[in-house]
Amino acid sequence: MGFFTENELETFDFTESYVSELRFGIGSCYLVADNVKILEKNSKNRDIRTMRTNGLMLRIVEPQVLAVIEEGCKIYNADGILQQEIADRIMEPEEYAALCSALEGAEIYGLKKEGTTYEIGIDGEEHSYTIRIQGTADTQEWERFMNLS
């Protein structure tokens, strides 16, 4: 990879980026995303404007999966009358591999870090998911800078 940063997650904007590859489980966690914005304050961004990249690999060091939540929803009929309410569901570790494959190409609507907890929000084809992972550090690797437009 051409560029490498460590613990600079706040210098990237993953909103409206897409999952190219996602893997997490015991002792391993990485996300490859396309259309990630690299903010001006990133230590490798020598430009004075926001840039973007494809194929950015985010790794979480010493990861521990705290929860993978399939977000619930409310289903209404055409008249706006509630037909069904589906509650949030915590997924089992056995489901993680299938979920990772299903989320390839899905849009990331948020990625944030609070303390040592990383929270990734992804819009799947039928459901949205929140993935919470605890880690000691994060690294980012990417090949090149591209213009936003």
Image (spheres, rainbow, N blue to C red):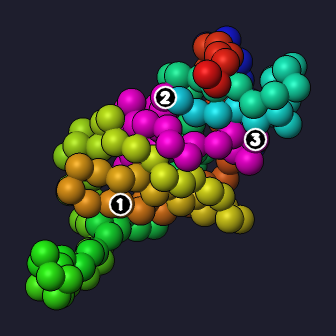
Q: Which residue is mark 2?
A: 34
Q: Which residue is mark 1?
A: 129
Q: Judge the density around disc 3: few (<14), some (14-19), many (≥20) Cα neighbours within 10 Å.
A: some
The x, y position of residue 14, in whole percent, is 57, 43
Residue that protrudes farthest toward the front in the picture: 79
The part of the chain drawn in magenta is: 8-34
Please name the amino acid that badge 1 sits on: Tyr
The x, y position of residue 99, in whole percent, is 25, 49
User: Number of callouts in the render?
Assistant: 3
Q: Distance of mark 1 from mark 2, alpha carbons?
A: 18 Å
In the figure, 11 relative to 45: above or below?
below
* Residue drawn at x 24%, y 65% as measured from the top left: 92
Q: Judge the density around disc 1: few (<14), some (14-19), many (≥20) Cα neighbours within 10 Å.
A: many
Q: Distance of mark 1 from mark 3, alpha carbons?
A: 23 Å
Inspect this view and state whether residue 128 appears.
Answer: yes
In the figure, 62 relative to 83: above or below?
above
